[in-house]
Amino acid sequence: MTLAREDNVRCDVAVVVPAFNEAESLPELVERIAGAVDAMGLTWEAWIIDDGSTDGTFAVVERLARERPQVHGLCFGRNFGKAAALAAGFEAADATVVITMDADLQDDPAEIPDLIAKLEEGWDLVSGWKQDRKDSFIKNNTSKVFNWFTGRMCGLRLHDFNCGLKGYRREVTRRVKLYGDMHRYVPALAHLDGFRVTEKPVRHFARKYGTTKYGMARFVNGFLDLLTVYFLHARRTSPLHMFGRIGLGFLGAGGLICAYFLGLWLLGHGLRLRPALLLGLVFIIVAFQMISLGLIAELVVAGRRPESAFRVARRV
């Protein structure tokens, strides 16, 4: 297989693997990655990011690096989360195409050629879609709700935003900034930055070693991070549109309440301090605060060129 290789990159394909207590699965994973990419005739490297493991994961990475020069590793002093591990891997990788996958063998490295072929069609990011998930009933169904809600808010309809198996062009990994639990929203972040995003059905396997690393807190964190994505990206070029709408809503409600009491006063009724009147005044104050916040945000973004648009634009 041939790949349009960019200038000044070390290799054709880089595989980034976040790992947290996955010492048992890494040897088999690396062997399968090597078999998949070598069969394509492409140069490659694998970056395994040890996210503060306590089971000797990095010792396994060091051994694998001695056996295969393509294998490299990074080790965090403590567990920072998958987003931080991916960000470190994106920074370290130097390839035309970057593939991410989980270290637990639930993702199949044999999918790598198909992901690259999809990127070669002109897409910037190809996200895996686990059609037949080998997870629990609760996890499967909460993921469906999460994917539907994320698609509605971000304007990108995918069946599986959080699949660990993805293919990226180098420009995407250089542009997208990850922190917290933002790894769930990489396709949405890329889409909002103007990159072309699609999905591809991939195989999914039951976990072979160890246990899942995610608890119930991920649902709350995921929802809060989705709000962050929406506020910081979907409206960052026109903040007054968002804050102004909220302010006008409060202004309309407060104005109606105050107009009602003004009408009573004009009809000769005594104007007493009532909770409803206070609520109307509070709404009006909040309205002006929201509009003022939007205007200040407009001053912040004024004069900034749309950086993402320039980076995504293509010459012909």
Image: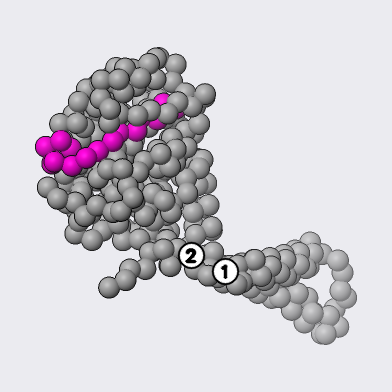
Q: Which residue is mark 2?
A: 307
Q: Residues within 10 Å of mark 1 (few under 14, many from 20)?
A: few
Q: Residue at x 50, y 31 (%)?
A: 80
| Residue 252 appears in view | yes
Q: Which mark is residue 304?
A: 1
Dot 2 lies on which element? helix
* 47 inside magenta stretch: yes
Q: Residue at x 41, y 26 (%)?
A: 50
- Using the image, determine if residue 206 lies above or below residue 170: above
Amino acid type of disc 1?
Arg
Q: In which quarter of the view is residue 108 placed?
A: top left
- Provide the secondary structure element on which disc 1 rests: loop
The residue at 33%/50% (across/down) is 8
Q: In which quadrant of the rendered view does residue 56 lie?
A: top left
* Amino acid beneath label 2: Glu
User: Which segment did they paint magenta?
Assistant: 37-51
141, 243: nearer the viewer: 243
Which quadrant of the figure contains the C terminus? Answer: bottom left
Expressed as whole percent of the image width and height from the top left, the position of residue 256 reads 69, 75
Task: Identify which residue, 276 or 179, lies in the foreground.
Answer: 179
Please name whichever residue, 59 or 244, is drawn nearer the observer in this view of the structure. Answer: 59
- Crowd around label 2: few <14 · some 14–19 · many ≥20 (10 Å): few
Residue 225 included in the magenta stretch of the image: no
How far from the left and from the top, in percent, is residue 168? Answer: 31, 49
- In the figure, is residue 266 to the left or right of 135? right
Residue 44 in the figure: left or right of residue 282: left
The answer to whether marks 2 and 1 mark residues whose Cβ atoms lie closer than 8 Å is: yes
Q: Give above or below for 192 relative to 77.
A: below
Residue positioned most to the front: 8
Q: Position of residue 180 (x, y in %)?
A: 51, 40
Q: Is residue 99 visible?
A: no
Is 270 situated left or right of 68 in this image? right
